[in-house]
Image: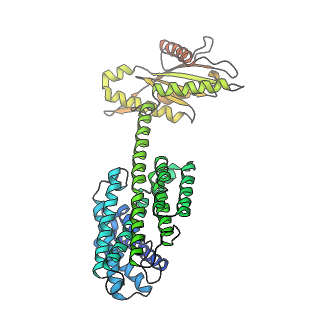
Amino acid sequence: MVFPAQTRLLHYLVLLGLTFALTLGGILARPIESLSLFWPVNAVLAGVLLRYPRQATLPGFALVWLAMVAADLLCGSAWLPALWFNLCNLGVVVTVWLLLSRLPRLHRRMRTPHGVLSLFGACAAGALVAASMATAMAAPWFEQSLRATWLAWFSEQFSTSVLVLPVLLTAPSVAALVRGGAQAIRLAPLLVLLASLAFSIAFGGPGAIAFPIAALLWCAWTYSPFLVSLLTLTAGSTLIVAVAQNLMHFSLPQSEPGVTTLMSARLGIAMLVLGPLVVACVSQANRSLMARLAHQASIDHLTGVLTRSAFTRRANALLDSRQQHAQALPLTLMMLDIDHFKSINDAHGHAVGDQVLRQFAGTLQDQLHDGELLARLGGEEFVVVLPGLAPDQAKFIAERLRRAVQELHVLHAGQQLQITVSIGLAGCAADTPAPTLDELLAQADSALYRAKAHGRNRVEQAEAQRQVL
């Protein structure tokens, strides 16, 4: 895509400001003259560039590096370490972006187990690049051995990327959040996770970092991948801080063995979230598949209205609910049949017939309200249920539907095809026993037969004494 120069400039300025702010915040939050315990800048930037790839260009990466260097110099760093170590940070961003941007969108957004495993591999590769580059220039600025320096860089970059990147890659768009609205969340898995984290810190010891795994798996089976990513980030960062602050009794002296122990804990915590993320992806895929199957079983693929089986379930539920109320509400069922539909198929073909069915169903849907059922029983035959309306009242609705269909014109080969509909009504008044669904369908079908026998394009009620409209 080609974007105006002003738009591209604005995007680059936003990227520059975001990088500067994140780097400045990370520097101010880390211990003085020490490597950061948690450095999310690289993972956040990689995630942003993967979600918004228009800035993932050579000028974009150059701006990221310059913003990092500027923030480092502002905080008092010397020129050479600021240039080199921020180049190490840029190495993480570029490596992760190069490896994940080539994946199909389904994998890149972590909607498959393959995507989760690819993310772990990309994070490991990015951490390897950064650790190796940092170790090559470590001697003038770090008192630790090369082994300890390499482990410190690798473990921090890997663990932070694994914890932060899934949140950015699985985050829904603002439009999706608005469409989804507020949804109830089961609190039990979340409360168990919080309790397991508290127990891990209170119990302590190296094995305590694995205590939350059962709760995380429960969360993964229950929540969306995005929410699971947030919970793994919370759990992982909590455990890392607890280990670093010696709250879990790891006994970490300020020596190389101690540093190695902390790095090992970081790597263990990072690997801990692999299982829950894979389970979350599989669970979400299963829920999506079940939703699609349920939709296909309930919605007619051609017209978008209820299928016969879905209508039967919902209509019976309405009748059962009516029977349970002390003051039963009225109810009306309509049978609708497109007049001379076979002639349309014979004269113009089944494709035109399908178009007629779609537009006919759409016209009916436009005239009906929430809570009123519309289904296709088969062929050109449809059924409508109007809860809360007796047949005497519903006949005006039926007449409105008939007129709306009569005014519908289907365009084909430059010609307008006019269609009409015959409607039969059956139902029950308030506080009267309701017939069964089969009885209602039979009564409405009988009224529909009379409507066709009397000339079509008309409404008939099931009761013989009702006046023909």
The answer to whether residue 335 is left or right of residue 297 is right
Quarter residue 395 falls in: top right
Point out residue 70 in the picture as x, y percentages from the top left corner. Answer: 39, 83
Quarter containing the C terminus: top right
Towards the viewer: 162 or 20: 162
Quadrant (top left/top right/bottom left/bottom right) for the N terminus:
bottom left
**Residue 201 left/right relative to 11:** right
Residue shown at the point (28%, 64%) measured from the top left? 98
- Quarter where residue 63 is shown: bottom left
Furthest-right residue in this view = 326
Q: How many numbered tags mark residues here?
A: 0
Q: Tell me where residue 361 sits by quadrant.
A: top left
Q: Is residue 465 left or right of residue 312?
A: right
* Colour mode of the rendering: rainbow
Does 35 sit above or below residue 162?
below
Image coordinates of residue 348 in percent, x first then y, are 31, 26
Looking at the image, is 440 positioned above or below residue 298?
above
Which residue occupies 60% across, 20% down?
427
Q: Position of residue 40 (x, y in %)?
A: 43, 70
The answer to whether residue 193 is visible is yes
The image position of residue 370, as x and y in percent, is: 57, 36
Q: Residue at x 32, y 29 (%)?
A: 351
**Position above or below: 101 against 311:** below
Q: In the rendered image, is residue 10 in sight?
A: no
From the viewer's side, name the closer residue of 224 and 121.
121
Q: Is residue 281 left or right of residue 451?
A: left
